[in-house]
Amino acid sequence: MKYSLILSYLGIWAFSLIIFWWIMAPGDAMGYSILFLWIIFPITTFVVSLSVGKKEYSPWKKWLLPLILGFMYMLSDYLTFKTANMLAFHKINAPDMEYFVAGVVISVIGLVFGVIFSRLKKTH
């Protein structure tokens, strides 16, 4: 139970890669981007972080989570759109750090809300 949210996040992340590389048609890129990069990953990042923020984990583990989820969010773009571009044009692209920052920010917001909810629950 302790790792179920993280495993769920990894499952969604892996599923998104499968959708991109094996199921999605070339004209579906915008829909994929909106669905996964703008809706599903931000929501799952927030929910996982909120849940972890509510739990009693050691602070270093708790605050390491935003870096991990930010990295995973960045990888989701890099292993899909960036890799497809690299294969099509035979060049190397760097990952977009904006995705990393966005993932970290979303995760930190979720953690902060989780910690606040946890402390409010203790006081009542």
Image (tube, rainbow, N blue to C red):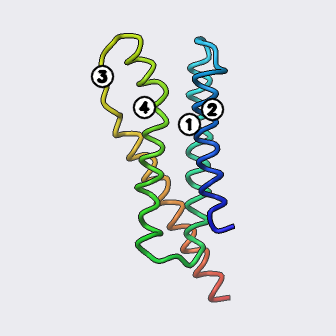
Q: Quadrant of the N terminus?
A: bottom right
Q: Quadrant of the C terminus?
A: bottom right
Please state which of residues 33 and 91 is positioned toward the viewer in this rendering: 91
Q: Amino acid at mark 2?
A: Leu
Q: Residue at x 40, y 55 (%)?
A: 67
Are circles 3 and 2 on residues that touch, CB within 8 Å?
A: no
User: Residue beneath label 1, please?
Assistant: 38
Q: Position of residue 16 (x, y in %)?
A: 61, 34
- Residue type highlighted by circle 4: Tyr
Other-residue count near label 3 (Cα within 10 Å), few / some / many at <14 / 14–19 / ≥20: few
Disc with the residue nearer the chain's start (1 vs 3): 1
Badge 1 marks a residue whose secondary structure is: helix
Residue drawn at (50%, 67%) of the image:
112
Name the disc covering residue 78, or none.
4
Labels 2 & 1 near each other (Cβ < 8 A): yes
Residue type beneath disc 3: Ile
Identified by mark 1, the residue type is Trp
Nearer to us: label 1 or label 3? 3
Residue holding disc 2:
35
- Upstream in the sequence, badge 4 or badge 1? 1
Residue drawn 57% across the image and 21% down it = 30
Q: CA distance from mark 3 to mark 2?
A: 26 Å
